[in-house]
Image (spheres, helix red, strand yellow):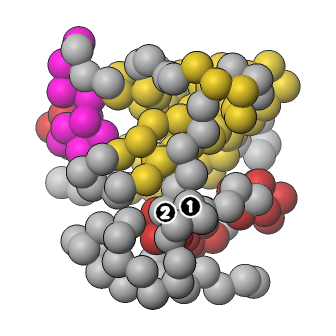
Amino acid sequence: KSAWKVVNAKLQNYGFDYTYYSKKVWKSGVIDAFKHRHGYVWGVVYRVSKEELKQLDEHNMAYNAYSYVIPMNVSVTDKVGNVYPCRTYRVRNKMSGTEVHGKYRRFQPSRQYRNCVIKGAKQQRLPRDYIDKLRSISPLFSDKIGSTKHRNPEIGTLCDKERHR
């Protein structure tokens, strides 16, 4: 069995930002969805089996009721108005701050992580204005080009260069 893409869709009344710091895997901020009136998050709807859903939960570190990341069931809408039930993930307890809509703290992403997010959005052909929004958040100041301090070695060079279209 394998997951397969259904459609690109929008999660309305949510925003995205880097509200969690990944100490072990990315050594930087990682992206998160949060309620935000008039906001939206674009993504991809995949059809997955129940076994794959369990693996997806584990991959996203949503292991149990005490995990810092928790799954949430939402409804998303495609370009023509079809609605799909979906599962996404959010950080349970975000750190207070003012950088994210005056509510949460932002943890800058590593250059590698940010480029992976942007590259994935481009490969899935998400709207250009949304990709520009993703691109508008700068990577960690300390993450200079060529630095290995904030790199996930398992990713290798896959996301090193963000090519503009």
Q: In this view, does 143 lie above or below 22?
A: below
Of marks 2 and 1, which one's residue comes earlier in the chain? 2
Considering the image in quadrants, where does the N terminus appear? bottom left
Q: Alpha-carbon neighbours of circle 1 within 10 Å: few (<14), some, or many (≥20)?
A: some
Which disc, if any, is residue 110? 2
Q: Please, is residue 88 above or below residue 124 in the view? A: above
* Residue 72 can be seen, yes or no: no
Quarter of the figure with the C terminus: bottom right
Kindly identify the residue that appears in the image at 67 percent across and 61 percent down. 138
Q: Residue furthest front?
A: 142
Question: Looking at the rendering, which quadrant does residue 115 occupy?
Answer: bottom right
Segment tinted magenta in the rendering: 55-65
Quick one: 131 or 25, which is closer to the camera? 25
Q: Is residue 159 left or right of residue 125?
A: left
Depth check: 156 or 121 in front?
A: 156
Q: What element carries label 2?
A: loop
On screen, 29 above or below 70? below
Q: Outermost residue toward the top?
A: 65
Report the mark closest to the observer, 2 or 1. Answer: 1
Which residue is at a point 52% across and 56% down the rendered structure image? Answer: 109
Q: In the image, is 22 to the left or to the right of 53? A: right
Spatial CA span between label 2 and label 1: 5 Å
- Picture coordinates of residue 66 (x, y %)? 22, 14
Amino acid tagged 1: Leu
The residue under label 1 is: 140
Badge 2 amino acid: Ser
Q: Nearer the viewer, residue 148 or 76?
A: 148
User: Taking 124 as reference, is 80 left or right?
Assistant: right
**Spot occupied by residue 147 in the image (x, y as percentages of width and height):** 42, 80
**Residue 39 versus residue 94 in the image, above or below:** below
Q: Residue at x 41, y 42 (%)?
A: 21
